[in-house]
Structure formats: structure tokens, C-alpha cells
Image (cartoon, rainbow, N blue to C red):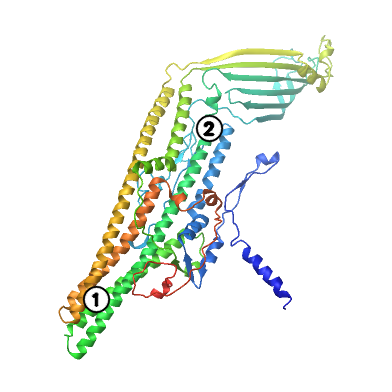
Amino acid sequence: MRRLQPALAVLCVILTLGPVSTAQDRTPTIESPGGVLGRYKPSQTAAIALSNSSRLEQLIRAGNLYLSLQDAIALALENNLDIDRARYSPLIAQTDVKRAQAGGALRGVSTQVTIGPSSAGGGLSLNAFSNGSAAGGGNASAVGGAGGVNGVISQLGPSIPNLDPVLTSTISWGHFTAPQTTAFLYGTTSLVSTQRNFNFAVSQGFLAGGTAQLSFTNQIQAQNSGRSDINPTTTGQLDLLVTQPLLQGFGFAINNRQIVIAKNNLRVSDLAFQLQVIATVSNIVGLYFDLVSFIQNVKVAQQSLAVSQKLYDDNMKQVEVGTLAPITIVQAKAEIAARRQDLVVAQTNVLQQETIIKQVLTRDEDPAVSAAHIIPTDSIQMPATEPIQPIQDLIGTALSARPELSQSQINLDNSKITLKADKNALLPSVNLFLEATNLGQSGPINGLPPIGNNLRSVDPFFVGGYGTFLSQVFGRSFPDYRAGVNLTIPLRNRAAQADYAHDELSLRQSEIDLQKQIKQIRADVQNAVIGLQQARARYDAAVEQRALEEQTLDAEQKKYALGASTVSNVIQIQRDLATAQGSEVTAQSQYAHARVNLELATGQVLPNYQVSITEAQTGHVARPPAPPPVLTPQPQGSMLPLTPGRPALNQYR
């Protein structure tokens, strides 16, 4: 055994140096089948993963979920279903790019952003998303260059040709019997024909607006007529037809517009994903700090209950010795009941908040997680002084960092592209076409006996099989050429004029909306700065009020001990102290929310909380979980800030 100890020690070191958690890439993918036949098979998308990340298990110890703010954010990036759903939007946008490259109309991409749940018990919620300029406002919207509405795909402007080559073929066999009014033409009054057709065509559209079609048709026909010199007869042609618009629908810019818009929408979907991450991170930060405040409220309620219980015990002793009237016991007992009710409300708020946070941080129900109590290991940090930053610098940061502003600018660019197509649709349709056709005909000498004096005088050039026919076609023995222009001039053109006017007016509205959004962002920053200043002033006042109430209660208790005060006065001051302590906790929570609102307004949520969009896309955060806190009991009567050393929450129940 002693010989194995060095090896075991090395193994333990290796295991210690190993990764804390296994990387679990949750990026959705589309697997397209390969090969030629793969073009006609559906792509495959992996089934959704409902398992929670291993980080959750590593944070649970002794039935408690010890959760730092950074771990809460990491769990949200790994397990939140709203972020998970948003991961599919860029893939959907990629399918639109592929559709546009084939010349198809766009289906549009979703820019929906889900803010997340509010806190329990009427707790504070972030308000930076309440206006239209914020990250989606929780409303669903879609962008696209073709107006995908309720699944109906429409496309304004000149039609874009099909940019994917298409092969069409018709192979048929037929038997036909045609009664004749005279036998002079075919030598029979019942002409029977059998036909075999083998027709093929390849068509292709081009970004210049033109189309090309190469078709090969041939027919083998046999008849029961002795009049024909050649029977059966093989006839057909090789035809090349090229059509190019010269006005309406001409140019790469017009026919490439859907591809450009689809690529722009891909950027929009990336920004929408970033907005969803911002919304989720902001939401979990608010929920986390509300949980911290709710637990602090439990401590406040416990302190108030302890003070009321002490007053009751002291009064009971004095009543027993006859120095107080028995009515004081009733008053003190009623106060205990009221404080117990406050404690129950505070504890249930904590339980409800734990449930809400677990819903945000998990994918599926886990009995261990459901049974665990969340122990926040971070407190709300109140800086000694507020950093001073010029408001114009904050506004400049917001205008350059807010993703929704970039979204609006891209959508405005898409509208300008669509307007160019509408302008082109006002022009007459002038299409140049060029066509070249090679004809051929061949067959064996008719084996049926000639009718009447009809003598066979067959040109040897036409006598032969299918090879003779092909040699004539590809040897251009019988060429045809054709060129021309198709001109279509709408005499009123009201539909195209209406489309252009409609989209131009909508563009002007979008430009106004963009300016409104810029103004709203400025207002958001200014309001967030004012809100932070108010929250700080409210907190400072609450701290002073709480300190004053503590001193007042201490003085009143001393007066009461000397018989210079009444039970009613002591109870009232105890209530005032409890209110002041609760106001301090609320003010601290409001400050935390005001700080997050400022980060939202300036677009600094992700950098301030060290959130990587790449990690959000993969659903795996490389940062390991925080180490377990050192549990050192604290006096339950103290109003210390929540630190990693505070006792477990179940000690307060």
C-alpha cells in the first residue's frame, strides 16, 4: 500500500488540475446531407437539450445552493430557455440568406426579446425596458425585405429570376387514332400514330436580371400511312433562348437586393441575440439583488420579533411582581403577533424569489435543485462616493453601444434598398431576347407499300437512325436565328407609383423613429443618472433614519425601565425602527436596480458583468464556479451586510 501512495498522490494532483466542468456546447446546428441526392433531402437539426449544466451540481452543498452573482449570470447563460430560444434566430436568418441566394423572397427574422419574470412580493423590477427604445420592450417583431406577414411571403419591386439552375424533362408515349374525311392525304381513313417524346430543358437566372434556357426536344412518330417517304420519323431541335431586361429589372443592385437584405437581417438577428442576453443578465441581476434584500428583510423581521419578545418577557416579569398593569402583557403580545406576521411574509417572499430564480437558471426540473435553498454569497455594494462622469460621455457611450440602435439603422438601410427596387419598378419593361435553334429530321425509308403512283424519292441526307438526327442538330444543318425586343408600357402605372410612395413615406417615418430613438436613449441615460442619484440620496437618508430610530429606541427603553415611558411609546418606536430598517433595505435594493438601469441605458451590461457573447452562443461559461464560502455564524441581532460568512438561510426559518 505504501508503494501505491506516490502514484495515488500524482493521480489526485492530475484530477485536481482537470477541468471543473465538462464543456457542453449548446450551439444549435443544421446538418445538411451531402452528395447530389442530398439536395433533395431535408436538413437535420439536433433535438433540444433539456439537461442542466454541471455547474448547478457543483454549487449545491449540504442542501443549499451557494450562489454568487457571477455564478448566477453563468447559469443563466448556460441554462436559460429564453437565451436558448434566441440561439436559433441567427440560424433562421441564415436560411433566409440561402433562400435569397436562390432568388426567393425572404421570410423575415424575429427580433423578439423576452425580459423575464419580475420579483416576488411586488419586488422591484427593471424599468429600462419599459420604453420603445430599449431592448425589444418584450414585444415580438420581425424584419425582412419582403414582408413576411403571418406566413405569407410577398415581394415588391421587379421580380428576381430564379438563381438556381432548374432541369425540366418530359418523357411521354402516346397512341392516337384520327379519322380522316378522305384517304387522299394519308392513304387511309383511320390514321394511327404512335409518338415518343423525350424533351429536356435547363434554365438559369442571373443577377443581371437575365435568364437563359437551353432546351432539347425530339419526337419519334410512326404512322400507318404509305404516303410518307420516311416512317417512323425522328424530329426535334436544340434551342437556346436568352432574355435580358434593359430597363425594369436590370442590374446587379436590383436583383441582388434580397441577398443584401438577408445578410443585413443576419446581423439584426445577431443583435437580437445580444439584446436577449442583455435582458436576461439584467433580469437575473435584479432578481439576485431582490433575493439579497428579501433575506435582509427576514433578518429585520427577526430582529423586530426578538425586540418585541424581549419587551413581552420584561413586562411579564414586572406584572408578576406587580409593578405593571396586566394590560401591558396584552399590548406586548399583540405586537409579537404582528411581528411574527411580518416575519412570515418576509420568509415567503424569500421562498417565492428562490422559485423564480430557479426557473430562470434551469432548463428542467431537478429534485436536488428544487429542494435546495439559495444562499447568495454576494452583497449589494454601496460605494463610498459615486463616480462622476460627464453626462455627454455617458450618452456617447450609449449611442455607440446600444444594440437596438444598430438594429434600427440596419432596418433603415433595408428600407432604402427596397425603395430603389420600387423606383426601378416604375420603368417600362423592355426585354431583349436572342434565340438560336438547330433543327433535325431523320428516319428509315417507309416500309409500307406506296399508295397509287407515289414513288419513293428519298433524300439520303434524311435516311438514318437517331444518330443521323443528332448529327444534324449538333452539326447545325438547319439553323434558325431570332432576335427582338419585348416592350410593355403601363399606361397609368398606378400600382408601381403607389408602392414607391408607400415605401418612401414609410422610410421617412423610419427616419423619424430613428431620431426619436436617439432622443429616447439620451433621455434614458439622463433619467438613469438622475435615478441613481435619487437612489443614493434615498439610501443615505434611510441609513440616517435607521440610526436615529435605534438611538430613539435605546433612549425610550431606558426611560421605560425607569418608569418614565409607557408600553405604547416603546411599541410605537419599535415599529418605527422596523420601518426604518425595512426602508434601508429597500433603498439599498433600489440603488442596485438604479445601477443596473444605468448600465442598461449606456449599453454596458455585458462588459460590466464580464459576459462573453461567444460563451452565451455556445451555452458554456469557461469561468469555474466560485469556491464554497466559509460559514461563520453571526449574531442574529446584528444588521451586518450579507457576506459569504453569513449563516445558511434555513437557520432563519
Image quadrant assignment for residue 125 = bottom left
Image quadrant assignment for residue 32 = top right
Q: Position of residue 385 (x, y in %)?
A: 34, 55
Secondary structure state at the residue bearing disc 1: helix
Q: Residue at x 37, y 30 (%)?
A: 508
Q: Residue at x 39, y 57 (%)?
A: 286
Classify mark 2: residues with Cα within 10 Å, few (<14), some (14-19) or many (20+): some
Q: From this viewpoint, is residue 231 visible?
A: no
Q: Position of residue 640 (x, y in %)?
A: 36, 69
Q: Residue at x 57, y 27 (%)?
A: 161
| Residue in front for this viewpoint, 481 or 139 | 139
Secondary structure state at the residue bearing disc 2: helix
Q: Amino acid at mark 1?
A: Glu
Quarter occupied by the N terminus: bottom right
Q: Amino acid at mark 2?
A: Val
Residue that label 2 marks: 260
Residue that label 1 marks: 335
Q: Position of residue 580 (x, y in %)?
A: 26, 66
